[in-house]
Amino acid sequence: MTDPRHPRPRSRAHRDRHGRGLRGRLVPASVPMSRTKAEIFDDLVLDTVEGLERRYSKELQGVEFAVEDVPPDLNVYDSDVLEDGSVPLARLLPGRPGRHGVPPRIVVYRRPLEFRAGDRDDLAELVRDVVVEQVANLLGLNPEDIR
């Protein structure tokens, strides 16, 4: 039994300590709406890469694909960088063969591509174009032959 002079403190499970509402996610993690822009972008790159790997599995074996938010600060970009104006969209690092070789790597920059896309469909098409062009450069093919 509780002492009437010392009532139990009220539960604050439904509000934060300032009384401003619920804490945490409003949408369950299983609902597509809860996915971040970065997760959606990663999925677009992965879908494109998986499609290319089905066609060019032997040629792309060992090639690494990566996503970075923004390109690094460099004054001059080499020919291995796909640019729109002076803004890098992706980069091909050809790798170094040998005993301690570094595998080829294609890096796609998320924020510049998102900035250029009007909606998710435009973004998916742009991601595909950029990844295909970098794969074509790596394999020494024409990008139109890969599409």
Image (cartoon, rainbow, N blue to C red):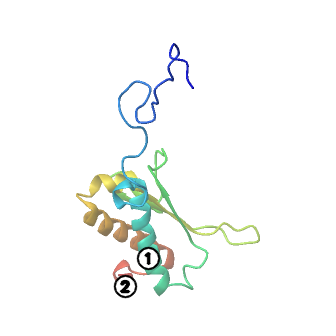
How many marks the image carries: the answer is 2
Q: Position of residue 131 (x, y in %)?
A: 41, 69
At 39% across and 53% down in the image, what residue appears?
36
Residue 76 left/right relative to 144: right
Q: Earlier in the sequence, mark 1 or mark 2?
A: 1
Residue ranking furthest to the front: 1
Callouts 1 and 2 close, C-beta under 8 Å = yes
Q: Which mark is residue 66?
A: none
The correct choice, above or below, for 11 with respect to 123 in the image is above
Residue 112 left/right relative to 105: left
Q: Give SS at disc 2.
A: helix
For the question of whether residue 82 can be seen, the reply is: no
User: Where does label 2 land, which residue?
Assistant: 145
For the question of whether residue 58 can be seen, the reply is: yes
Circle 1 packing at 10 Å, graded few (<14), some (14-19), many (20+), is some
Pick whichever, 99 or 45, lies toward us: 45
At 35% across and 81% down in the image, what residue appears?
147
Q: Position of residue 138 (x, y in %)?
A: 50, 74
Mark 2: amino acid: Asp
- Quadrant assignment for the N terminus: top right
Q: Give SS at disc 1.
A: helix
Q: Position of residue 72 (x, y in %)?
A: 49, 47
Q: Position of residue 79 (x, y in %)?
A: 46, 62
Q: Which mark is residue 136?
A: 1
Q: Which quadrant of the structure image shows residue 127?
A: bottom left
**Disc 1 to disc 2, C-alpha distance:** 8 Å
Mark 1: amino acid: Ala
At 42% across and 54% down in the image, what residue appears?
38
Pick whichever, 82 or 116, lies toward us: 116
